[in-house]
Image: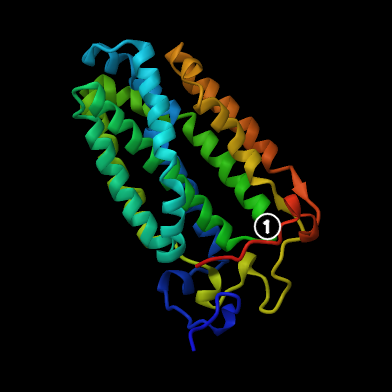
Amino acid sequence: MKPSLADPTALPLHKSCVVSRTPFYYGWVVLLAATFGMLMTTPGQTLGVSIFLDRIMADLGLSRATVSLLYTVGTLAGSFSLPFIGRFIDRRGSRTAVIVISALFALACVWMGFVGSAVALLVGFILIRGLGQGALGLVSLHVINLWFVRRRGLAVGLSGLGMALATALFPFVIEALIGAFGWRLAYVVLGGLVAVTILPLGAWLYRGRPELYGLEPDGARRGADRYPRSETILWCRRAGPALFGFSPLATFSSPPSVPALSFITTTSWRLAASTVWRRRRSSYLLGLSPPERTY
């Protein structure tokens, strides 16, 4: 009989030298790796794309209104793939998913370096928004949720704070690349950076649910209560960046101020998310029972 997802103790244990040799709870390693994974979504985030805007418009001869429209359509179109990506993550696991997503996102960044028309730019926006801002961020947040239950609010809050602080510096890296190589080659270099950082790092450190390795979420004792006493309202964490990211006029009206404004918006919302708590599992939003945790 095939083991049930509802009974993780019946699942065969996986062997991992990385997990077994870690002298502390491996979830903290996952947290650091996933935070870096979310950092590497920057080439597909609004704060990253906005730095390229003036160069793209001048090179392709497009107006600001046209590029803003293409960006909005690309963001919406890219988001339609997320339910299918989520299903893929559920079926194949976080480790396989981050390898595939990182490889495709790296290629999407390379594509951006070769766009020569409005149609090609639209395709590029769909790819980097769907794979970077969407898929890579999704799998990174998902793997954190697998390894933390009682401390999920703390883990996501630390990850959000770490990413916000790191992304305050990333725009300067992009500006330096553009100044040294031009905007096209800069995007190709960013694709290479994704390929040599989060792709191997995710393959090395991302892991599925801790029960597969003989561990419990949060490093708790075997047999302890599996449900959290309190949990962060994760939607709050996404609300600020989403509201900012879906406003093309705000995004593209004043490019030099975008990284700072995005950093302030993202940081404030993620800090707020880490302090908004729900009482017990009986008070889950809309009365829904806790979702079944996946591999």
Snapshot quadrant of residue 62? top left
| Residue 155 can be seen in this image | yes
Residue 125 horizontal/vertical position (percent): 34, 31
- Say what secondary structure mark 1 lies in: loop
Q: Please tell me which residue lies in front, 95 or 280.
A: 280
Snapshot quadrant of residue 228? bottom right
| Residue 171 can be seen in this image | no
Q: Is residue 86 left or right of residue 118?
A: right
Q: Please tell me which residue lies in front, 6 or 271.
A: 6
Query: What residue is pinned by disc 1?
Result: 151
Residue 137 horizontal/vertical position (percent): 46, 45
Vertical side of 199 occupied by 249: above or below: above
Q: Is residue 77 left or right of residue 111?
A: right
Figure disc tally: 1
Q: Please tell me which residue lies in front, 69 or 233.
A: 69
Vertical side of 256 occupied by 49: above or below: below
Vertical side of 116 occupied by 196: above or below: below
Snapshot quadrant of residue 157? top right
Q: Residue at (54%, 27%) from the top-left corner?
A: 263
Q: Please tell me which residue lies in front, 136 or 155.
A: 136
Residue 182 horizontal/vertical position (percent): 22, 21
Q: In the orientation shown, which residue stands out farthest toward the bottom?
A: 1
Residue 191 horizontal/vertical position (percent): 27, 39
Q: Amino acid at mark 1?
A: Arg
Q: Residue at (68%, 57%) from the top-left corner?
A: 151
Q: Residue at (48%, 23%) from the top-left corner?
A: 259
